[in-house]
Image (cartoon, grey):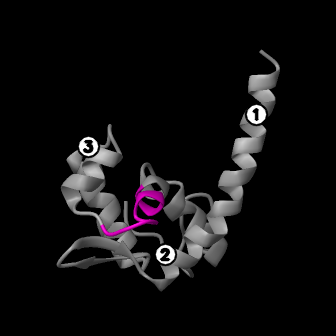
Amino acid sequence: MSTPIPGRPVRGSKSGQPIMALFDLLGRSWALGIIWNLGTRSRTFRQLQTVCESVSPTTLNTRLKELRNSHMIESTINGYRLTKSGIEVLDLLKPLGSWANKWSDKFNQSK
């Protein structure tokens, strides 16, 4: 599976609309987890493996490559870090994280 690129067909969209390319990228296993875990600081491959717990080295390597190709992360001497685009995406996701916590509370209240 290749890196989703706006303007090219992606999973779920033959049109390659930018939003569909983004959803394809972010919907891949561990893509969001990697972005989320790079939100606070740079991390090495091994550190990402630790914080992402059950991710296989092969999957992690593939996602890192895709996220680099998509300009969401970059590799530095200190490990991987979010690029400006990655930070922007994370900033857009943070309100969803807050909403998800409120949503989760509704399930906890019904027990």
Q: Which residue lies furthest to the top in this view?
A: 111
- Residue found at x 59% / y 63%: 23
- One can see residue 15 in this view: no
- Residue found at x 42% / y 81%: 83
Question: What residue would you read off at disc 3?
Answer: 56
- Residue found at x 62% / y 77%: 18
Calculate the distance from the C-alpha at mark 1 to the C-alpha at mark 2: 28 Å
- One can see residue 83 in this view: yes
The local secondary structure at tag 1 comes to helix
Dot 2, crowdedness within 10 Å: few (<14), some or many (≥20)?
many
Sequence-first disc among 1 and 2 = 2
Q: For the residues carrying marks 3 and 1, which lies nearer the camera in this image?
A: 1
User: How far from the left and from the top, in percent, is residue 92?
Assistant: 65, 69
Residue 108 shown left or right of residue 49 in the figure: right
**Residue 30 tag number:** none
Question: What residue would you read off at disc 2?
Answer: 86
Q: Is 100 rendered above or below residue 63? A: above
Q: Nearer the viewer, residue 78 or 27?
A: 78
The span shown in magenta is 34-42
Calculate the distance from the C-alpha at mark 3 to the C-alpha at mark 1: 31 Å
User: How far from the left and from the top, in percent, is residue 109?
Assistant: 81, 23
| Residues under numbered marks 1 and 2 in contact, where contact means CB atoms less than 8 Å apart | no
The local secondary structure at tag 3 comes to loop
Sequence-first disc among 3 and 1 = 3
Q: For the residues carrying marks 1 and 2, which lies nearer the camera in this image?
A: 1
| Residues under numbered marks 2 and 3 in contact, where contact means CB atoms less than 8 Å apart | no
Q: Which of 16 and 37 is in front in this view?
A: 37
Residue 27 in magenta? no
Label 3 is placed on what type of residue? Ser
The local secondary structure at tag 2 comes to helix
Report the quarter where the N terminus lies. bottom left
